[in-house]
Amino acid sequence: MALHKTRIASFIGMALLAVSGTCTTATAGTDARPWMNRRLSPDQRAELVLKAMTQDEKFRLIRVDFGDTENGHVMAPGALGSAGYGPAIARLGLPAIQESDAGLGVAKPHKLGATALPSGLATAASFDPAIAYAGGVMIGGEAHRRGFNVMLAGGADLVRDPRNGRNFEYAGEDPLLAGLTVGNAIAGIQSQHLVSTIKHYALNDLETDRTTLSANIDRAAARESDLLAFEIAIATGHPGSVMCSYNRVNSVYACENDWLLDQVLKRDWHYPGFVMSDWGAVHSAAKSALAGLDQESAGETFDKEVYFDQPLRAAVASGEVPQSRIDDMARRILRSMFAAGVIDHPAKQAPIDFAADRKVAQRAEEAGAVLLRNRDALLPLSAMQSVAVIGGHADKGVLTGGGSSAVQSPQGNAVPGLAPTAWPGPRIYQPSAPLAAIERRAHGKVGYASGDDIAAAAKLAAQAKVAVVFVEQWAAESFDAPHLALPGHQDALVEAVAKANPHTIVVLENNGPVAMPWLDRVEAVLEAWYPGAAGGEAIARLLYGETDPSGRLPVTWPRDESQLPRPSIPGAGLAAIGLPPQGQPAQDVDYDIEGADVGYRWYQRKHLRPLFPFGYGLTYTHFDYSGFRPQVENGKVTASFTVTNRGSRAGVDVPQLYVTLPGSGEVRRLAGWCRVDLKPGQSVQLVATADPRLLANFDGRSQRWQQPAGGYRLQLGHSATSFEGEGQVTLAAASWAANASPAGVPQPCVAGGAR
Ligand code: BGC
């Protein structure tokens, strides 16, 4: 939109599902409102309400207004100052719809503040569905206590390009990892009696000219990549709503794309919830309605007109859209409200335990920060060392990504006034200063230099035993980075500090992979992503070894742009932050270049060696694998193996199971993993199960998933490129229809026993 509002082990198989509020005791007064009977199913209850609804009430339910005051919009009296508002239908006992962004916390109203989770990429990097679920519970709980009952969360678009401005809202490049991470986050949110969305459906993988760009891709390849992530996340978390995206897919706008909405989502995946539009993503009444859009969001503010009022009424009157379709829209919305408990457990203002919630955010950051380099075991730091802390506003706080998902702390913005102050800003910092957290731990002298003056920073670094340089890259919805370089003079700053002090550590606060021309000259690098509400504390705990770094990269880290499927993004950039766009934005992006081989699979296919592979991350100890034994049991592919902690410290390992299908060359897929916490010398036996969805290819002609007959190579990886354990199993051919995918949550890892 052009206009915008300003352990022993925690296992992947933990099916932390929580759709609530469906079945307790009957409520008094159900005679007049039989749908309030909690013994009935969400479908039955929705049907009963629908029967009692007038046409006007249905039409009121299928559109939601903007809930804020920007762009000249006059806020409705009951709205809370957030993304969306639909008035209550008191006659029927239906509460107002109160919608809040987004997946990293309650984004609005800014002035009230909320607890920010670290980036979605940090949560994905934990490879821990329990961390994702806990984050969902936390942000859903805060949203409910602010009076919201719909959370616009669940960013599941795959990272196809490290320069995409919204990568920090998403869960990486792998469909299984993204699907399970996002699905569990959604389940967590919905456990708090809110409807969560999953978004942005689909292939909203770039922000440049996102409202018109067509993402072009072979349909079968889409099913095996971006759509598979959504399919797994929906099967895992049962989001009440799917948000269709701004972009076009194969030339047709996502919110009027019959293939995406009606055929794939509603028919093949049997999705019972409702499709809501992104803000400004609707371009038609009848076409959208017939394709499967169920609710128009803030059309009066962001669309050319409110399509789901007069124009749609006219289409019904003329017979172009059947009445049954209007009923289906309303029924789906009502069903999701009942299923999530929105009606039985109305959201209302209540106190929030911010201290407890900060701990949830801190744990997510500690589980998801990735140690990329640690030469000569410089880390963990010793309290006795003197430290020069440099750059990144580390004296004030940690950076947050921008756009509609940006969360401000209840204590306010730690560094106000930095560009851009208007959309897609403001640029927000969480008041969790790494400097203070380091000072609390270091007995030696701690100094700080802002880094604005490179010579002064180098001088400070020269006087200390170690130097910790914080570098940052702000990203936000609505623009992509034109290249991978860190903004401003930060590369020169790192070079100068590293020259002055051989023991230099770089901490990255960024959207994702960036160029690191100085990599060989620094001793350690910690990828902290956008670190969230307690980021400073989490970073210090990791640097000082109070907790072991345990994140693994959910994205491949390229050496440079030439390794990417599309080396440049014409028109990418944002002048307000010194990145003026170059060239005309494309109206079509060709995703058939890599097709389903997103991220690490592209590197394998092209025999490219990335800077850091998917799945990579160091710890303060080391692990080895033994006894790798793949087998087929009742048609299921499993592999048992033993992981041993060979170091002298406790630590977390993430052994990863990759599979290469017959006839697919070198391209392997992540089929399962475990996350295991081991004491020094401890071993554990694990059994990984490859999800059948990863053992098949989608055949566009027959519209079936086909599992080819032949030998399947299985490898046990420390990452997508480093293996310790390999074997093969033979499978017979199998296939299932597009609408008969395996149901339920993938269960790729179970514990054997600890020794
Ligand atoms: C974003 C959505 C968001 C919506 C409402 C749009 O600009 O793309 O992710 O939920 O605004 O704020």
Image (cartoon, rainbow, N blue to C red):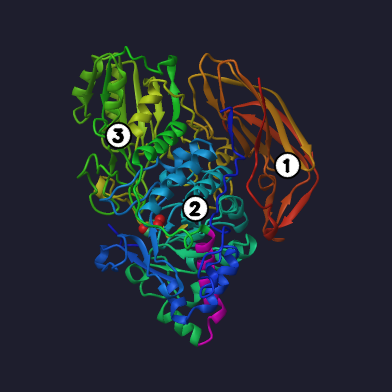
Could you say where residue 14 lies in the image, as x and y percent from the top left?
A: 60, 40
Residue ranking furthest to the front:
28
Write down the quadrant of residue 291 in the picture.
bottom right
Helix, strand or loop under label 1: loop
**In which quadrant of this rendering is ligand 1 seen?**
bottom left
Q: CA distance from mark 2 to mark 1?
A: 40 Å
- Residue 475 at what x, y percent from top left? 34, 45
Query: Where does the magenta region start and end?
Result: 318-339
Quote the CA–CA distance across marks 3 and 2: 28 Å
Give the structural element (helix, strand or loop) at label 3.
Answer: loop
Which percent across, then down, holds residue 490?
Answer: 28, 32
Instruction: Quadrant for the C terminus, please.
Output: top right
Image quadrant containing the N terminus: bottom left
Residue 290 appears anywhere in the view:
no
Which one is nearer the viewer's eye here, 518 or 638? 638
Look at 52% across and 30% down and name the residue there.
616
Image spot of residue 424 (x, y percent): 30, 52
Magenta residue check for 319: yes
Q: Could you say whether the residue bearing mark 2 is in a helix, strand or loop?
A: helix
Q: Which residue is mark 3?
A: 432
**The residue under label 1 is which amino acid type?**
Pro
Q: Which residue is mark 1?
A: 662
Please state which of residues 745 and 214 is positioned toward the viewer in this rendering: 745
Residue 270 seen in this snapshot: yes
User: Up-down: is 427 above or below 213?
Assistant: above
The residue type indicated by label 3 comes to Ser
